[in-house]
Image (cartoon, rainbow, N blue to C red):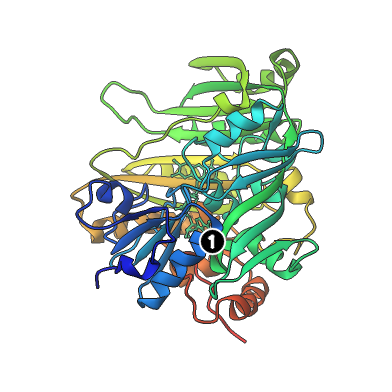
Amino acid sequence: MPFDPSTFADSFTGEIILPGDAAYTSAANTYGGPGAPAAVLQPRTPHEVAAALAAARSQGLQVTVRGGGHNTAGVSTNRGGVVISLRNLNAVEVLDAASGAVRIGAGAVWGDVAVVLGQHGLAISSGDTRTVGVAGLTLGGGIGWMVRKFGLALDHLTGVELVTAGGQFVRASHDQNPELFWGMRGAGANFGIITSFDFVAKPVGKVTFATISYPLDDVPGLLRAWRDAVRASTEDLTTSLTLMPAFAPGMQPAGMILACYAGPAAAAEPHLAPLRNLGTPAAVDVKEVAYADVLEEAHPPEGMVITVRNAFFKSLSDEVVDAIAAMHSLPGMRVFQLRHMSGAVQRMPHGETAYSLRDSEIMMFVGSFFPGDTAPAEVAAQMKNWEPLAALGQGSYMNFLHTATAEDVASIYPPQTLQRLSRLKQQYDPENIFSSNYNIPPSG
Ligand SMILES: Cc1cc2nc3c(=O)[nH]c(=O)nc-3n(C[C@H](O)[C@H](O)[C@H](O)COP(=O)(O)OP(=O)(O)OC[C@H]3O[C@@H](n4cnc5c(N)ncnc54)[C@H](O)[C@@H]3O)c2cc1C
């Protein structure tokens, strides 16, 4: 059914992008997948967000909300419904530089946030990519380059402003609607359209970023050596280990360690030394940079299908190491990335947020690459290789999944958390208007 823009009268100043418009193709598709919505609405104010929601609901059209559009399961677009994109609500305001209080519009992306906050000597540990949205990353967690020192992006939150399914303007914080604030931090896409986020940013000057590559001739040996080094390291150091395949002829597979030390190079040096001595590195690069310059651009590879799976592991035990090495030895083009999580995330009291699986030493995702014409059955058969590893994990990280099924949702939240979220969903969105997400079923 086509979208009827006349529902808005004259009050909507944002873009209304319809099929056939020049802007339609790029507005319809996202990083995570293609879409064919009846309209993409880009409101400019919270009141216009409410008007967009009311227009979609009055026409009986599915509603999908979009922040940065980088969800890996492609849930921020749809077919035949209305996409409400927050991209025009992207202001980054420093409310009080001394305390770090900042307000960020829900359409902002992390690269822009890092630049503005950096001008005030502040930063929020978010993710590794400039174009990823503040909204989606924060609502699901946010594992960034200072996660060990400062915790998840959502651990920096002090409040959110949102428009509910019924069109009310609501604030959620520790003092106002605290149960909603609990749910926002781990399942927030389910309860309304967030228009702005209040965070406390941290004082951060220059950081030191290191890239250290090793040949991949002994995968379990490298995994164990990296594990032992990072276990002994300071929380000022956050690192990942990526097992890279040979993407192009002549390229060698590599074990690439990326490390961010939250401080200048001179102070970082003794903490980086153990990571340079895990064997004989093929390449080492260390630079002192602004935090904003650590974030990178990312583009999906042309002509390839990528499937992403992930799991949290309580511990990178020898059993887990051996299972990773076993999967790594199978034929196929895969990237394994292990992110070291120990530190501030684990210190947040259990049950404080809907994001639950905090007692994890490691989050690991595996991205599998297939030529674009690979049959879905072949992709599914290959993905079975992931199951032995997943069985050793304790659930999934919402923000690196390829699908958004009920099974995925059950892997993100422990049963009691899911029941509590279902009651909150019943209170704020009993008709499940917000269902393009890791969907919580409403229940009394
Ligand atoms: C290249 C790349 C790099 C990444 N790197 C990292 C990383 O380093 N660390 C990490 O933790 N994650 C990372 N991610 C994962 C990322 O956190 C998720 O993909 C996240 O969902 C992206 O947020 P977004 O706003 O861009 O997404 P969107 O696709 O816009 O939205 C994601 C979900 O949030 C909902 N949503 C969006 N805005 C709102 C709103 N205002 N109100 C209510 N619901 C809303 C959407 O409906 C959807 O369900 C990366 C992803 C990619 C593609």
Quarter of the figure that contains the N terminus: bottom left
Q: Position of residue 150 (x, y in %)?
A: 73, 40
Instruction: Residue at the far front: name it.
Output: 10
Instruction: Residue at 20%, 56% (x, y): give it.
Output: 375
Badge 1 crowding class, 10 Å Cα cut-off, few under 14, some 14 to 19, many 20 or more, is some
In the displayed structure, 164 sits above or below 40; it is: below
On the image, the x and y values in percent for residue 280 come to 54, 16
Q: In this view, does 380 lie to the left or right of 390?
A: left
The answer to whether residue 295 shows anywhere in this view is yes
Q: Which of 207 and 238 is in front in this view?
A: 207
Which residue is denoted by mark 1 in the rendering?
47
Residue 340 pos. (x, y %) = 63, 40
Image point (79%, 50%), residue name = 347
Give the number of callouts. 1
Q: Which amino acid does label 1 sit on?
A: His
Q: Quadrant of residue 397?
A: bottom right
Residue at position x 64%, y 78% in the image: 419
For image coordinates 58% across by 84% down, the residue present is 443
Instruction: Measuring from the top left, give residue 398's x and y in whole percent.
Output: 53, 57
Which residue ends up furthest to the top in the rendered image?
266
Q: Which of 200 and 344 is in front in this view?
A: 200
Q: Quadrant of residue 393?
A: bottom right
In the image, 155: left or right of 84?
right
Above or below residue 247? Residue 427 is below
